[in-house]
């Protein structure tokens, strides 16, 4: 069983944007990155996986459950590129809300919140309201909210944007720890330097088409860096 | 209903109430309403003292019924404002993605937002009602409430729910002001079509048919007749005889509301976010 399976997805909207027959498999317990230049269709694909948008044709399954069903998201954590939530919530309040919505209760909820606050180094901020947080603190709160819950799959949309070097390092550690715990991580990014060291598998999406899908190892074995391979693949198709 | 499902409903409804409670509009409306009720109370007291011993009979129930009619009308506006903002702010703050990424259906999201808003608006309505009743009873030295008020309150609760529902639906397709204008137009059109078509005999429905009459007939048959609820509420308030065909009107209201809710649910499910 794959963590995420995308079969023959087509989606067109706007004047000239579309996804053309996208097929993709994300294996369980791996760190997978969807790479592509701005406007390639990465966010659209993430929205389709989460059923925020509807495809024209094709099928998406999360752990063998159709993405059209709410149950498909029961083991999924998601953080958008810029995490935001209502400013009157405290940091702890946000985590409580996210945990409850993901099915946690009682002592489970409390202990997961405490762990997430500690992992993200924001336990001192827990009673602060979101409106008083800096951009970096807000992003860490979002990541903490992502970690609260019983997930098998974590989806992170452009997670490194807006993070300082320490935040980036912390995030990479968290991602690796999640994989070590058997979780699947789906990253959507265009920061290639980070992806080469972090990911097991990548797919390259450009202008709505998957140009490559495979392991990072297979690219490195050819003697190429991920950055060079990406550049070559995308420019050949231009 | 599983424990998780119940907890999600509770959390979403609480989240909706918390969101709207912080709204500056609500605070303003709350203060304005309280002042308006106190002012009406003072005016009533003055009126009573200046007419003491005169032939003018004033009692708590009559003057309160007038006040309640005003509160009913005002509550519709408030239901519209908050029905629209309940989802619109999720769009504007770009938070809707996070809600819909949770393991909840769009139907659950929609109804939890609507119920949360309804609790808040109906709570506000009850506050206005009870405060008016207490002050008017004090001013007139008579107990102002009667059982008709209770029935009227419950009916207005249903009315407020439907108005919130329509507002919610319009806020999916238009901005705040646009949705509010669409709501006012809908309530107005339903009101005009109900009062004009109801006055006709069945045989006159299709007589002298023109585009306006056809439109009026479509609204009359296929949209919930909101007036029915307010007319019924007014009858209970003023203890007047109910002249409507209750069974038929109620059946029509249930059927058209169900159709409306079904279509709204389809729209929410089909929409791309």
Image: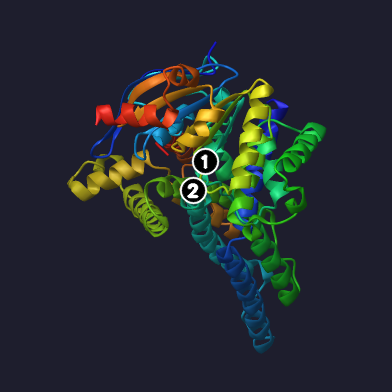
Q: Report the residue at 33% width, 44% height from top.
A: B219
User: The C terminus of chain A appears in which quarter of the rendering?
Assistant: top left
B260 relative position to B65: left or right? left
Determine the residue located farthest toward the front in the rendered image.
Answer: A223
Dot 2 corresponds to which residue? B94
Image quadrant in which you'd find residue B223: top left
- A233 or B253: nearer the viewer: A233
Q: Position of residue A48 (x, y in %)?
A: 43, 29
Q: Please tell me how crowded label 2 is: few (under 14), some (14-19), or many (20+) other residues with Cα within 10 Å.
A: some
Side of A237 relative to B19 (left or right): left
Q: Secondary structure at mark 1?
A: loop
- What residue is pinned by disc 1? A80
Note whether residue A11 is visible.
Answer: no
Mark in front: 1 vs 2 = 1
- Percent from the top left, x then y, of residue A129? 68, 57
Give the x, y percent position of residue A54: 39, 29
Viewer-closest of B210 and A123: A123
Q: Is residue B18 above or below residue A112?
A: below
């Amino acid at each position: 069983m794959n963590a995420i399976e995308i079969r023959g997805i087509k989606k067109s909207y706007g004047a000239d944007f579309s996804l053309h027959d996208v097929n993709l498999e994300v294996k369980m317990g791996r760190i997978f990155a969807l790479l592509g230049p701005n406007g390639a269709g990465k966010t659209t694909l993430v929205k389709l996986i989460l059923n925020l948008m509807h495809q024209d044709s094709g099928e998406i399954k999360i752990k063998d459950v159709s993405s059209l069903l709410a149950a498909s998201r029961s083991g999924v954590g998601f953080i958008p590129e810029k995490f935001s939530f209502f400013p009157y919530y405290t940091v702890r309040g946000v985590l409580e809300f996210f945990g409850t919505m993901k099915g946690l209760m009682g002592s489970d909820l409390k202990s997961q919140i405490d762990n997430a606050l500690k992992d993200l180094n924001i336990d001192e901020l827990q009673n602060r309201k979101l409106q008083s947080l800096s951009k970096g603190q807000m992003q860490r709160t979002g990541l903490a909210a992502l970690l609260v819950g019983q997930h098998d799959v974590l989806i992170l949309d452009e997670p490194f944007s807006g993070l300082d070097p320490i935040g980036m390092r912390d995030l990479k550690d968290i991602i690796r720890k999640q994989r070590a715990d058997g979780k699947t991580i789906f990253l959507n990014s265009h920061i290639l330097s980070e992806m080469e060291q972090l990911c097991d598998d990548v797919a390259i999406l450009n202008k709505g088409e998957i140009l490559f899908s495979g392991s990072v190892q297979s690219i490195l074995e050819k003697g190429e860096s991920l950055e060079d391979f990406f550049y070559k693949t995308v420019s050949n198709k231009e | 209903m599983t424990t998780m499902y119940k907890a999600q409903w509770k959390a979403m409804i609480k989240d909706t109430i918390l969101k709207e409670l912080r709204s500056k509009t609500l605070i303003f409306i709350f203060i304005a309403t309280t002042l308006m009720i106190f002012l009406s109370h003072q005016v009533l007291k003055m009126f009573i003292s200046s007419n003491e011993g005169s032939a003018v009979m004033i009692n708590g129930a009559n003057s309160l019924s007038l006040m309640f009619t005003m509160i009913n009308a005002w509550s519709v506006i408030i239901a519209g404002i908050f029905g629209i903002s309940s989802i619109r702010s999720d769009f504007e703050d770009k938070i809707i993605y996070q809600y819909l990424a949770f393991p909840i259906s769009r139907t659950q999201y929609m109804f939890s937002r609507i119920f949360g808003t309804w609790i808040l608006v109906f709570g506000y309505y009850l506050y206005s009602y009870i405060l008016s009743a207490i002050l008017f009873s004090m001013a007139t030295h008579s107990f102002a409430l009667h059982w008709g008020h209770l029935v009227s309150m419950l009916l207005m609760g249903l009315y407020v729910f439907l108005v919130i529902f329509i507002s919610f639906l319009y806020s999916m397709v238009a901005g705040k002001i646009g949705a509010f204008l669409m709501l006012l137009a809908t309530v107005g059109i339903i009101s005009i079509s109900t009062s004009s078509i109801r006055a006709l005999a069945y045989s006159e429905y299709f007589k002298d048919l023109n585009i306006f009459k056809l439109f009026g007939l479509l609204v009359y048959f296929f949209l919930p007749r909101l007036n029915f609820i307010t007319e019924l509420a007014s009858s209970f308030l003023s203890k007047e005889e109910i002249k409507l065909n209750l069974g038929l009107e109620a059946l029509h209201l249930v059927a058209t509301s169900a159709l409306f809710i079904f279509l709204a649910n389809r729209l929410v499910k089909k929409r791309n976010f």
